[in-house]
Amino acid sequence: MVTVVTGASGFVGGVLVRALLEEGRDVRGVDLRRGPSIEGLDIEFRQADVRDGEAIREALEGASTVFHTAAVISVTGDRSGRVRDVNVNGVRTVAEAALSSGVDRFVHCSSVHAYDLEVDAELTETSPQATDPHLPPYDRSKAAGEAALREVAARGLDTVVCNPTGVIGPHDFAPSRMGVVLLALFRGRMPALIDGGFNWVDVRDVVAGLLAAETRGRTGENYLLPGHQRSLLEMALAAEEVSGVPRPKRVVPMWIARAVTPIGNIVSGRTGNPLWATSESLHALRHSPPVSGSKARAELGYAPRPFPETIGDTYRWFQDQGLLPRPATDTDRPAP
């Protein structure tokens, strides 16, 4: 039987495909295009939009497990409606196809953003979800996507939902928003830091959690997959430790950063440059409650690796890709 990964060309999807191949599984990747994260891998690939019911039903034919990782991430709102369309209607369409195809298990990679991050307590799987209209559109779309999935699950689809925090790590081919930030730190091109932070998790640990959810997760349950709570300053210090590049000296107070977000909203929205702070990116950095991983640890055997290991492996992977210079060795230096 085949294992299907939607969003296979994405960050999490690409690492998941590699892990499945290492297990000797027959993998079918589904995405809008075959990106560099899965280029050259021995998989079957189907080009399909997760909102296209007919194409998705064909892509899921004969599947035993579906890992749904396809999503649109946004920190600049949802003016076109595409964020909600993919993150809600896309989930519903793939789930409906999985139900009609007789899939044994549907593992949905959602996000911690499906929860209301403004809570004044540790975040657990029973915390309120992001349904309030004042919350960022992306957050609300992830919560609504889970609600759409539960409607299909009520008709017999075996589902498990995983909610990773901020994903970072190696094999970040795009690179992701935080991958761009880490590259800027490694290159010494980050002008300043913002006084805020988030919970960051290694993509390889997310994939381990997804695989464990397939075999050990309880039907209908959510599992938070956190890593480590770190400020941007702590992230910069870890980047400095592995790269030797000095961290930015300026740390901008949150109130100043918020004051200039109208400019960041415009520039980031037009250019996609993640180094400009937006209202929504600052919302995440301001509202970052501690995230409990106790349920995933107890039921899935989830164990995130140390934060410095993630930063170091990411640095070395960027070097392997030619995105960062390698340190000179004795053989590289000219003879005296």
Image (cartoon, rainbow, N blue to C red):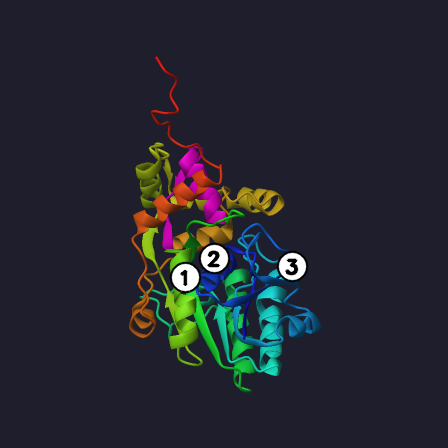
Mark 2 or mark 3: name the one nearer the start of the chain. Answer: 2
Instruction: Return the residue nearer the eye: 58 or 205.
Output: 58
Instruction: Report, in whole angstroms, how far the alpha carbon at label 3 lies from the one at label 1.
Output: 22 Å
Secondary structure at numbered mark 2: helix
Secondary structure at numbered mark 3: loop
In the image, what residue type sits under mark 1?
Answer: Val
In the image, what residue type sits under mark 2?
Answer: Val
Residue 300 location in percent, x, y? Answer: 34, 72
Residue 33 location in percent, x, y? Answer: 64, 56
Tell me, for residue 97, which label it has, or none: none
Mark 2 burial class by Cα count in 10 Å: few <14, some 14-19, many 20+: many
Q: Residue at x 64, y 70 (%)?
A: 59
Q: Residue at x 58, y 45 (%)?
A: 272
Residue 322 location in percent, x, y? Answer: 49, 37
Instruction: Return the residue nearer the eye: 288 or 24.
Output: 24
Tell me, for residue 15, which label it has, or none: 2
Can you name the residue that lies furthest to the right here? 54
Write down the residue under mark 1: 206
Give yes or no for contact between labels 2 and 1 (Cβ–Cβ under 8 Å): yes
Please name which of the two marks, 2 or 3, marks the residue nearer to the observer. 2
Instruction: Return the residue nearer the eye: 31 or 201.
Output: 31
**The N terminus, quarter of image:** bottom right
Mark 1 burial class by Cα count in 10 Å: few <14, some 14-19, many 20+: many
Tell me, for residue 32, which label it has, or none: 3
Secondary structure at numbered mark 1: helix
Residue 249 is left or right of residue 109, and the answer is left
Q: Residue at x 58, y 81 (%)?
A: 99
State the extent of the magenta-drawn residues as a range.
Answer: 177-200
Q: Is residue 90 magenta?
A: no
